[in-house]
Image (cartoon, coloured by chain):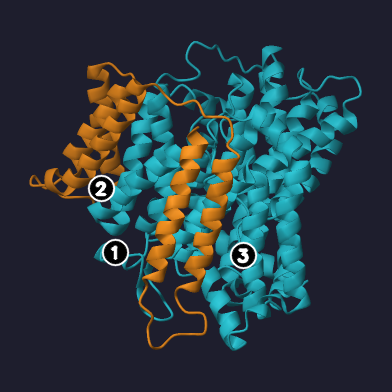
């Protein structure tokens, strides 16, 4: 079943891609092939392979239970927040928080997770910023 | 003689303190990454790319660092295969078959030593193979016009599809997806934006480094979260290494095996699409058929440890041949290395050998040096790396995620790229669940623009005649190989791949 849904999604993606390709504005200075042809070829391959996947599906993969899926979704939200808040909070604080969360969800005890998070954050800061001089996000506190 | 001169020049480039230090660092990190289940050569190299950039390294030092990691990971994978029966990375999965029984029988040290030696022999011979074969391939490649290059790219995708998945349609899907992603951005030939949907960030196209790190490194974090597999695989196992010196008779017994499988592995590596996992698989299968008279393979035969290790290390060297000589990588990790070169504004291919001989020969010399370093690290100092296996994923995986973010942020400094990377991480996770190979996607994003511009150049030169693509004997030959490479696995490959996947993990793992 998974493959059928996946294949159908792929066909939809291919059709969307083909439409987006047809919508590309042609420049008046174009070569013989133009900017549309190759994307249209790709859309064709994408569509054909997706249709094949849908018609001849493999055995369904082992999907995680709903609670595990929620776990991954939560991690994605945390990571997206991390990406957004990085410039606001500064590297050290944001990273410590995100790493603590991940470590906690992977099974560390809360205190151990906090220690891991702070350790990872300070470790990366020391190696990448202080030693290697990489510019990391600077927060209101300057680190 | 020319060859030896070039090689001598290469050594003069590689033998600086900086380059030696980078090779040492790369070997060390690579062995660790290979040994840790969950980190393999392709995601290991991927998360180190930003490091290479931030150090402000030039092309040669950056390549030395990253190929040392690549070679190192090929050595390191065997450690957890032998001690824990868990392959540290995909190419090492065949090593479990005989390595773990040897360890159970109290011969862990000997298994580690003989496999380390086999790795050395494989890499050493493959590096010579690279020296001898790459210049020949360059001579052929210089005859290539745009039409031939287009055919060559198609060949790479089609043969890669043949081996990387059990389902050809999924490989084709992955390749088309990667190519499609590469089209995003301003068209270089006419200047019109494509697939940008008005988003300014997309005008430059999707940075393939963002895609690689997301697909390879971040998806691994999601896999671990899904399984909530937070404790170290080594916890609760006692690891007694024992004697590290294999008896002379064992080495003697394994020598013919190592030599044969080095050759075979090298060939497997050179073929586009095959890579190290296939190299170790066919090496093991061939040796089993050839020398396993008493049925000892699978029960702790040292030859069964030597064969896949020589095979996968030789394949790693072999995979560098098409990447350097043609600019078409044949495996996941060489695709990542290609990304590094492209980001440094160096285009691999035949011209690399004439325009940047320092990069090529410096790299080759560094490979020799790295190989000796790895031998020293992996036999006498192997105890150091077995301790690394005690690091639990609940510490390791957050570290991997955070280093990925730091790296991408360090290159671009934009939150938007981080969000794109998370998107790729999610996509990578879903696609791995569905057993869609990730390597064709990376290859597509890397080669998409070159493939398109060669197509357009070829057709434009011939005034819009599309049949120019199959006009020369060379391009017809390439198309023929491509079609055979795609169709043949449909017929004979099913058996081979089914067997390979029996041993592999079920998560549609990243091919070397």
- Name the quadrant containing residue B294: top right
> Residue at position x 58%, y 26% from top?
B80
Is residue B406 depicted above or below A99 in this figure? below
Name the disc covering residue B229, or none.
Answer: none
The N terminus of chain B, quarter of image: bottom right
> Residue at position x 53%, y 48% from top?
A50
**Residue B114: x %, y % from top left:** 73, 30
Q: Colour of chain A?
A: orange
> Residue at position x 77%, y 17% from top?
B299
State the residue in front, B475 or A2.
A2
**Label 1: which residue?**
B197
* Camera-nearest label, 3 or 2: 3
Mark 1 element type: loop
Q: CA distance from mark 3 to mark 2?
A: 43 Å
* Chain drawn cyan in the picture: B
**Label 2: which residue?**
A130
* Camera-nearest label, 1 or 2: 1
**Residue B208: x %, y % from top left:** 42, 57
Q: CA distance from mark 1 to mark 2?
A: 40 Å
Q: CA distance from mark 3 to mark 1?
A: 28 Å
**Label 3: which residue?**
B153
State the residue in front, B86 or B436.
B436
Q: Is residue B62 left or right of residue B51?
A: right
Callout 3: 10 Å neighbours few (<14), some, many (20+)? many
Is residue B506 depicted above or below B351 in this figure? above
């Amino acid at each position: 079943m998974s493959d059928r849904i996946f294949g159908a999604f792929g066909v939809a993606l291919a059709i969307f891609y083909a439409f987006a390709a047809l919508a590309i504005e042609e420049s008046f200075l174009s070569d013989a092939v133009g900017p549309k042809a190759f994307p249209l070829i790709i859309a064709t391959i994408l569509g054909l392979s997706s249709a094949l996947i849908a018609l001849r599906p493999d055995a369904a993969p082992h999907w995680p239970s709903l609670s595990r899926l929620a776990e991954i979704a939560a991690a994605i939200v945390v990571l997206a927040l991390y990406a957004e808040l990085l410039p606001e909070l500064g590297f050290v604080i944001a990273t410590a928080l995100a790493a603590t969360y991940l470590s906690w969800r992977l099974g560390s005890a809360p205190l151990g997770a906090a220690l891991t998070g702070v350790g990872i954050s300070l470790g990366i800061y020391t190696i990448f910023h202080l030693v290697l001089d990489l510019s990391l996000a600077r927060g209101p506190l300057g680190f | 003689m020319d060859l030896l001169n070039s090689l001598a020049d290469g050594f003069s480039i590689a033998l600086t303190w900086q380059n030696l230090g980078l090779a040492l660092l790369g070997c060390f990190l690579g062995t660790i990454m290979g040994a840790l289940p969950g980190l393999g050569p392709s995601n290991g190299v991927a998360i180190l790319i930003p490091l290479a950039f931030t150090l402000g390294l030039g092309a040669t030092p950056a390549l030395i660092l990253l190929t040392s990691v690549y070679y190192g990971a090929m050595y390191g994978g065997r450690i957890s295969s032998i001690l824990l029966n868990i392959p540290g990375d995909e190419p090492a999965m065949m090593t479990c078959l005989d390595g773990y029984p040897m360890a159970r029988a109290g011969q862990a040290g000997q298994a580690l030593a003989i496999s380390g030696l086999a790795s050395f022999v494989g890499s050493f011979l493959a590096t010579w193979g690279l020296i001898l074969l790459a210049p020949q391939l360059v001579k052929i490649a210089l005859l290539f016009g745009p039409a031939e290059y287009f055919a060559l790219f198609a060949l790479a995708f089609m043969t890669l599809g043949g081996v990387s998945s059990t389902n050809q349609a999924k490989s084709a899907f992955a390749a088309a997806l990667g190519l499609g992603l590469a089209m995003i951005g301003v068209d270089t030939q006419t200047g019109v934006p494509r697939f940008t949907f008005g988003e300014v960030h997309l005008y430059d196209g999707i940075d393939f480094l963002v895609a690689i790190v997301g697909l390879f490194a971040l998806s691994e974090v999601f896999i671990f979260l899904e399984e909530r597999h937070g404790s170290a695989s080594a916890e609760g196992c006692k690891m007694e290494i024992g004697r590290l010196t294999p008896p002379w008779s064992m080495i003697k017994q394994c020598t013919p095996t190592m030599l044969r499988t080095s050759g075979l592995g090298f060939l497997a590596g050179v073929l586009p699409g095959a890579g190290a996992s296939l190299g170790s698989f066919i090496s093991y299968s061939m040796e089993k058929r050839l020398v396993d008279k008493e049925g000892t393979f699978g029960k702790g035969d040292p030859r069964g440890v030597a064969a896949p290790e020589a095979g996968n290390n030789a394949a790693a060297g072999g995979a560098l041949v098409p990447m350097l000589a043609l600019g078409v990588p044949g495996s996941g990790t060489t695709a990542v290395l290609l990304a590094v070169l492209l980001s440094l504004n160096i285009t691999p291919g035949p011209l690399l050998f004439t325009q940047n001989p320092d990069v090529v020969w410096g790299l080759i010399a560094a490979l020799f040096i790295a190989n000796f370093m790895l031998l020293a690290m992996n036999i006498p100092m192997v105890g150091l790396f077995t301790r690394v296996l005690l690091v639990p994923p609940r510490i390791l995986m957050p570290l991997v995620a955070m280093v990925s973010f730091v790296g991408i942020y360090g290159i671009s400094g934009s939150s938007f790229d981080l969000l794109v990377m998370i998107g790729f991480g999610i996509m990578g996770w879903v696609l791995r669940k569905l057993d869609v190979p990730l390597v064709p996607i990376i290859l597509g994003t890397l080669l998409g623009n070159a493939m398109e511009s060669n197509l357009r150049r070829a057709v434009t030169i011939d005034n819009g005649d599309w049949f120019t693509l199959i006009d020369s004997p060379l391009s017809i030959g390439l198309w023929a190989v491509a079609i055979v490479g795609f169709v043949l696995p449909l017929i004979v490959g099913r058996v081979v791949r089914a067997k390979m996947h029996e041993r592999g993990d079920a998560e549609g793992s990243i091919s070397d």
